[in-house]
């Protein structure tokens, strides 16, 4: 994914050139490219609502809100580009969490592919729908005196370049039109890559939690030599005592029959100590992820809320006489917003459930019959798994990504849309 960013010219990796002089020059050129593209994007998105509403003032507010939301998303992408070193550091941390467990690796790979292609498809449909709405009906003839005349005929997708062939238009029209087309394509690659990078880290972290939870089930149960198979249903089965090596993701069966109590406790203490260290590494990775992605994702969270209201409001205002292009555009915007927003809440809920499952697995083991040093290690692990910061939080903890917050946003958006529709209907009746 980072290679795709670099090939597209959107993202410049620090240390790409071994020579520091070339690396510094590359970074300066990249910053100039970002500033130039920012100016083009801002000019295109600011002029977009005015160009579309030259002859139709009813859509001016909707176009202005859409441009504002797009600018907020691009702000997040720009901040992401300026914090590349943090993202690259997270990438190196992900590489250390190698999943040797084949079942967990396959399951996480399937989950990653589902959300990767789902978000890509939603972003692509949104981009195509935006280009479909670019037609001569939205762009009108502008003469040198600034007055409008008869609009163009509607243009399909294959005729999107026809307005560029009209040499009677002023220079500002061509600049706005080309920048709008260019920014739509670049904006698609930016947003899709940024949104697909979010699930990759969390899915790998979720896989490591599954591996850790599996090995925690081997701790305890000294007298009966029974080990937890399913901590949720408290199912046990008789197996030999296992020695766990979390760093290599391996374990071996050790026959403890006839051994002393102190020798048997060494295995449990070694397993608990490795679990505590491994869990501490996962928490450290999550904190670094929050610090790196918190600044980047905070504008996106606000944009999701605004886009949800806009797309839901447009869906309620659609009527039978509207064309198919507008219906596709509105539905695609609503689909992309809800898909990305739901996955962010889903990933946060998954991490919280992993923490709760680790706590339940360790608590249900027979740790009270272990030696004092092992019990202290277990108590330390239980204390760390009781933390409240398992959910993903943004805007200094004011926004907690969870299913409850997702439902509250939908409820607030639905109430606001009903209020706006009531105002519009009241004004229509008074007229």
Image: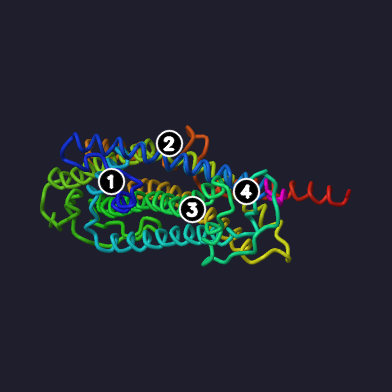
The residue indicated by pointer 2 is 295
Left or right: residue 207 versus residue 73 is left
Q: Which sits earlier in the primary sequence, circle 2 or circle 3? A: 3
Q: State the SS at label 4.
A: helix
Left or right: residue 292 versus residue 163 is left
Q: Is residue 368 visible?
A: no
Badge 4, how many Cα within 10 Å: few under 14, some, many 20+?
some
The residue indicated by pointer 3 is 184
For the residues labelled 1 and 4, say whether their Cβ atoms are less than 8 Å apart. Answer: no
**Of labels 1 and 4, the one closer to you:** 4
Distance from label 1 to label 3 (Cα)? Answer: 28 Å
Which label is found at residue 91?
Answer: 1
How many numbered marks are there? 4
Q: Residue 179's spot in the image, x, y percent? A: 49, 48
Work out which residue is located at the far right of the displayed protein and give it. Answer: 430
Viewer-closest of 377 and 344: 344
Q: State the SS at label 2.
A: helix
**Of labels 3 and 4, the one closer to you:** 4
Indicate the quadrant where residue 61 lies. top right
The residue indicated by pointer 4 is 51
Distance from label 3 to label 4 (Cα)? Answer: 16 Å
Q: Which residues are magenta?
A: 54-60
Left or right: residue 248 versus residue 31 is left
Q: Residue at x 12, y 45 (%)?
A: 263
Any magenta on residue 55? Answer: yes
**Of labels 2 and 3, the one closer to you:** 3
Q: Residue 34's spot in the image, x, y percent? A: 39, 40
For the residues labelled 3 and 4, say whether their Cβ atoms are less than 8 Å apart. Answer: no
């Amino acid at each position: 994914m980072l290679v795709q960013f670099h090939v597209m010219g959107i993202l410049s990796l620090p240390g790409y050139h071994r020579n520091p002089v070339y690396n510094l020059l590359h970074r300066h050129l990249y910053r100039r490219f970002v500033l130039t593209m920012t100016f083009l994007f801002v000019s295109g998105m600011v002029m977009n609502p005015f160009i579309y509403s030259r002859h139709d003032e009813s859509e001016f507010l909707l176009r202005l809100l859409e441009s504002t939301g797009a600018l907020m998303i691009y702000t997040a992408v720009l901040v992401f580009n300026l914090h590349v070193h943090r993202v690259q550091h997270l990438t190196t941390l992900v590489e250390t969490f190698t999943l040797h467990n084949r079942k967990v690796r396959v399951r996480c790979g399937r989950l990653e592919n589902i959300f990767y292609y789902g978000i890509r498809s939603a972003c692509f449909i949104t981009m195509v729908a935006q280009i479909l709405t670019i037609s001569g009906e939205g762009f009108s003839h502008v003469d040198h005196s600034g007055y409008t005349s008869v609009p163009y005929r509607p243009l399909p997708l294959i005729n999107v370049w026809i307005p560029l062939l009209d040499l009677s238009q002023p220079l500002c029209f061509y600049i706005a039109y080309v920048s709008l087309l260019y920014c739509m394509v670049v904006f698609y690659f930016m947003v899709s890559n940024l949104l697909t990078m979010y699930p990759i880290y969390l899915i790998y972290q979720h896989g490591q939690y599954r591996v850790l939870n599996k090995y925690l089930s081997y701790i305890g149960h000294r007298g009966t030599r029974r080990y937890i198979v399913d901590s949720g249903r408290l199912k046990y089965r008789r197996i030999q005592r296992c020695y766990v090596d979390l760093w290599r993701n391996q374990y071996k069966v050790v026959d403890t029959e006839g051994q002393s109590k102190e020798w048997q406790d060494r295995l449990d203490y070694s397993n608990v100590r490795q679990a505590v260290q491994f869990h501490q590494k996962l928490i450290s990775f999550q904190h670094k992820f929050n610090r790196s992605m918190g600044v980047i994702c905070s504008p996106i969270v606000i944009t999701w809320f605004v886009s949800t209201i806009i797309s839901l409001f447009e869906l309620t205002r659609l009527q039978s006489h509207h064309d198919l292009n507008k219906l596709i555009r509105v539905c695609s915007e609503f689909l992309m917003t809800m898909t990305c927003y739901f996955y962010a809440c889903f990933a946060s809920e998954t991490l919280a459930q992993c923490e709760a499952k680790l706590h339940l697995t360790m608590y249900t083991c027979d740790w009270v019959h272990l030696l004092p040093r092992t019990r202290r290690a277990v108590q330390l692990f239980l204390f760390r798994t009781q933390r409240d910061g398992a959910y993903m939080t943004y805007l200094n903890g004011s926004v907690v990504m969870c299913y409850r917050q997702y439902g509250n946003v939908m409820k607030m958006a639905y109430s606001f849309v009903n209020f706006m529709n009531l105002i519009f209907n009241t004004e229509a009746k008074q007229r």
